Amino acid sequence: MKIISIANFKGGTGKTVTACNLAAILAREGKRVLLIDADAQHNSSDFFGADPEGCTLTDVLEGTGEPTAADNVQETNLDNLDILAADMGLLRLDLAAIVNQSTAALKRFDDFLDALREGGEYDVIVIDCPPSFTAASVAALVNSDEVLMPTRSDAFSRTGVLEIREQLENVGLRLLRPLPRIRVLVTMAHSKATLPKQATAMYAEAGFEVCRTVIRSGEVVSQSTWQRKPLYVVAPGTNVARDYETLANELFDSENFRLNEQIELYLSKAISSERAAVNLGISRTTFLRRVDAYKASKKRPRGRPRKNDLNRADEISRGV
Ligand SMILES: Nc1ncnc2c1ncn2[C@@H]1O[C@H](COP(=O)(O)OP(=O)(O)OP(=O)(O)O)[C@@H](O)[C@H]1O
Ligand SMILES: [Mg+2]
């Protein structure tokens, strides 16, 4: 069970849009996903139509939820995707944590995740964090295997990214938790040109791992929030929808992602088959076999893949 938090102390950087779309794509691809809304603004809960009267993260952190961990989550209308909703009660928790200097909420969250791990219900947990350090976001961050930090390509977004790493190191050390893998994601780029490249270089210079995928800006994102449907449903094929697909590949299927990336570069005549083979560390003959398999898999009928289809697609792309 992999836990990935989407966080940045700066507000409005695309955290919720990233969390919702990433969770939806992974679920569509057959992974069993739990989206945890850790933000009192409850944007991702609203997006997936969670029942505000149902169990929430506040209940879990306050110990007033259902005794069995899995009973606290709600189903969404997408297959394979459940949600642990948020509500304004999360604000109450922050006050309690400050006043009582209590780590009770953190302990309860640890127990909740342990129970899910034991139950084996989920492959991936995606956590949509608020733009600040709160009881809920601390619990999320220190339990994460990975933290993905969406950031805009302007300089203002930089502070939130730098600050979160510093705080994470402090809190992580204090609680004796290992530091998660941190990756920066440039979002809302108007193009893939100058500014995103500058931002990428700046974060790399500051020692951050930066996602190769850049999420471009698109009006369809607003439409998707009104319709409460992921981008692959509302606007498949648009730049921003495609960018989120590429991101999911980059984060969760790195090996295939690298292979497909080289194949696409080769097919678009940007590089030779010899160069692609060298980049992948395989022979040219093997590379060309993978290209054939790739082309064949693209001709497969579209639609929601079933698990067997996914296994087969994987086999084809591995040249089996
Ligand atoms: N790629 C994009 N293209 C265009 N608009 C976008 C894109 N990503 C996000 N937005 C818009 O930017 C605004 C902020 O996005 P979002 O709510 O995901 O940010 P956030 O980081 O979760 O904000 P907060 O810090 O308040 O939780 C929203 O209005 C959203 O529709
Ligand atoms: Mg948000």
Image (tube, rainbow, N blue to C red):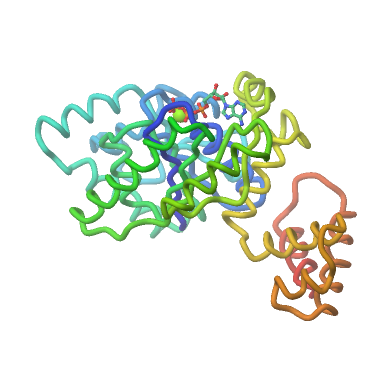
Quadrant of the image containing the C terminus: bottom right
Residue at the spot x=48%, y=52% of the render?
204
Relative side of 142 to 303, left or right: left
- Which residue occupies the foreground of this view, 212 or 286? 212
Instruction: Please state the total of marks drawn on the protein image.
Output: 0
Residue drawn at x 72%, y 41% as measured from the top left: 242
At 40% from the left and 41% from the top, the residue drawn is 161
- Residue 91 in the image: x percent, y percent? 27, 25
Spot the residue most to the top. Answer: 226
Residue 73 position within the rendered picture, expressed as x and y whole percent measured from the top left: 43, 38
Quarter holding residue 230: top right
Asked if residue 101 lies left or right of residue 39, the reply is left
In the displayed image of the protein, which residue is found farthest to the left? 100
Q: Position of residue 236 (x, y in %)?
A: 76, 35
Q: Quadrant of residue 71?
A: top left
Please determine whether, in this image, residue 103 is positioned above or below residue 143: above
Q: In screen coordinates, is 94 left or right of 87?
A: left
Q: From this view, report whether residue 257 is shown above or below residue 43.
A: below
Position in image of residue 192 (x %, y %):
67, 40
Task: Return the residue nearer the eye: 43 or 187.
Answer: 187
In the image, residue 259 above or below residue 37: below
**Which residue: 59% across, 40% down?**
196
Q: Is residue 4 left or right of 28 when viewed as pictured?
A: left
Identify which residue, 66 or 97, lies in the foreground: 97
